[in-house]
């Protein structure tokens, strides 16, 4: 057992951990109708929290649940970044738009974005 510290101990053997849970997607009728979403400022990387968890995403998912919504769509500086547990894509006039690539969001492969 290594003493408590943040650096990797020398000579330690790596551990692989995998957790799998069922993905419960909305049914076809719900997808066709759409789902309720709320919006919030994306502050995940602006808060100094010593954690390796997805705490920011968990808090935004809780915010959606408290507001009877399926998802929280997050904004930073007037631009959509992503949802608490999803990416955001917009189809408009035959084109697909996604938030611009950034080290602050998961990478997506569409280009361009719509500003509010």
Image (spheres, rainbow, N blue to C red):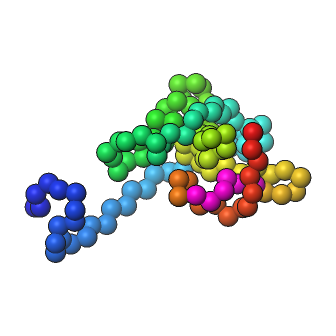
Taking depth in this image into account, of 109 and 37 the one nearest to the observer is: 109
Magenta highlight on residue 98: yes
Res 106 quadrant in image: bottom right
Name which residue lies at 68% across and 32% down: 36
The answer, for residue 93, to whether it is visible in the render is yes
Name which residue lies at 57% across and 35% down: 41
Name which residue lies at 58% across and 24% down: 67
Q: Is residue 1 above or below residue 44?
A: below
Residue 32: x and y in percent read 78, 42
| Image quarter of the C terminus | top right
Report the span colored magenta.
97-102
Residue 47: x and y in percent read 42, 40
Residue occupying the far top of the picture: 67
Q: In this view, does 108 lie above or below 116?
A: below
Magenta highlight on residue 114: no
Q: In this view, does 52 lie to the left or right of 68?
A: left
Q: Is residue 113 left or right of residue 45?
A: right
Q: Is residue 31 left or right of residue 11?
A: right
Res 34 quadrant in image: top right
Name which residue lies at 33% across and 62% down: 17
Residue occupying the far bottom of the picture: 11
């Amino acid at each position: 057992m290594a003493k408590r510290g943040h650096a990797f101990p020398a000579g330690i053997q790596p551990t692989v951990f995998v957790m799998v849970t069922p993905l419960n997607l909305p049914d076809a009728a719900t997808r066709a109708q759409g789902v309720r979403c709320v919006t919030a400022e994306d502050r995940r990387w602006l808060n100094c929290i010593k954690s390796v968890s997805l705490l920011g995403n968990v808090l935004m998912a809780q915010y959606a649940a408290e507001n009877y919504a399926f998802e929280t769509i997050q904004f930073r500086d007037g631009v959509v970044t992503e949802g608490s547990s999803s990416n955001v894509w917009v189809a408009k006039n035959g084109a697909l738009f996604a938030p611009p690539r950034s080290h602050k969001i998961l990478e997506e492969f569409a280009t361009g974005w719509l500003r509010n």
